[in-house]
């Protein structure tokens, strides 16, 4: 364990976040997400929900400020509905750490899978929220 770093962050996830460069993306996938089919670099976070994991990542991870949105979620399939509480819980974590972040962009399901194929890594969580997946685009780490 380290002081000031959430115990939700495994050594493997910390190393992955560190290795990512500006513009690289990481997917936080729900328990139903086909991560293994979409990307070769898979990290496991079984038993964790995405909102607390996002809250643990964001103090260490600058979001890209040079794009219209550095956050992406899957859009509902036609005829399906989204639970607004899912995005609201993610937005609460984002606003706590990066309050100037633009709204989360919604991406069509198969376009989301394609974006995942190009992502740096996928973190598979135990979250069962419908349409709970989110992609984070890394920004430039502030010089402190």
Image (cartoon, helix red, strand yellow):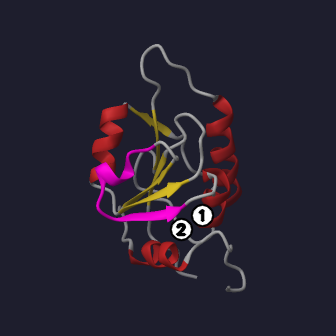
Instruction: Tell me if 11 is positioned left or right of 85 in this view.
Output: left
Above or below for 100 versus 142:
above
The question of residue 132 being in magenta is answered with: no
Of the pair 21 and 39, the residue shown nearer to us: 39
Residue 42 pos. (x, y %) = 39, 63
**Does dot 1 land on a helix, a strand or a loop?**
loop
**Residue to which mark 1 is pinned:** 58
User: Which label sits on residue 81?
Assistant: none
Q: Give the image location of residue 77, x and y in percent.
A: 42, 22
Up/down of 43 relative to 109, above or below: below
Image quarter where the N terminus lies is bottom right
Give the percent coordinates (x, y) of residue 127: 60, 47
**Residue located 38% across and 71% down the image:** 20
Horizontal arrangement in the rendering, residue 60 relative to residue 71 (left or right): right
Q: Are marks 2 and 1 in contact (CB under 8 Å)?
A: yes
- Within-10-Å neighbours for mark 2: few <14, some 14–19, many 20+: many
Mark 2 lies on residue = 61
Q: Residues within 10 Å of mark 1 (few under 14, many from 20)?
A: some
Where is the C terminus found, in terms of image quarters?
A: bottom right
Q: Quadrant of residue 74?
A: top left
The residue positioned 32% from the left and 42% from the top of the image is 113
- Cα distance in 3D space between marks 2 and 1: 5 Å
Please state the horizontal and vertical placement of residue 89, each as a whole percent of the image.
Answer: 68, 44
Q: Which range is magenta? A: 33-45
């Amino acid at each position: 364990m380290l002081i000031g770093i959430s115990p939700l962050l495994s050594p493997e996830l910390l190393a992955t976040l560190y290795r990512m460069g500006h513009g690289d993306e990481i997917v936080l996938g729900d328990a139903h997400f086909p991560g293994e089919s979409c990307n070769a670099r898979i990290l496991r976070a079984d038993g964790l929900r995405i909102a607390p994991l996002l809250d643990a990542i964001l103090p260490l991870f600058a979001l890209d400020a040079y794009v219209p949105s550095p956050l992406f979620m899957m859009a509902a399939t036609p005829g399906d509905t989204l639970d607004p509480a899912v995005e609201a819980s993610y937005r609460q974590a984002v606003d706590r750490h990066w309050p100037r972040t633009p709204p989360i962009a919604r991406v069509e399901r198969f376009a989301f899978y394609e974006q995942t194929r190009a992502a740096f890594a996928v973190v598979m969580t135990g979250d069962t929220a419908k349409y709970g997946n989110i992609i984070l685009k890394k920004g430039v780490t502030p010089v402190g």
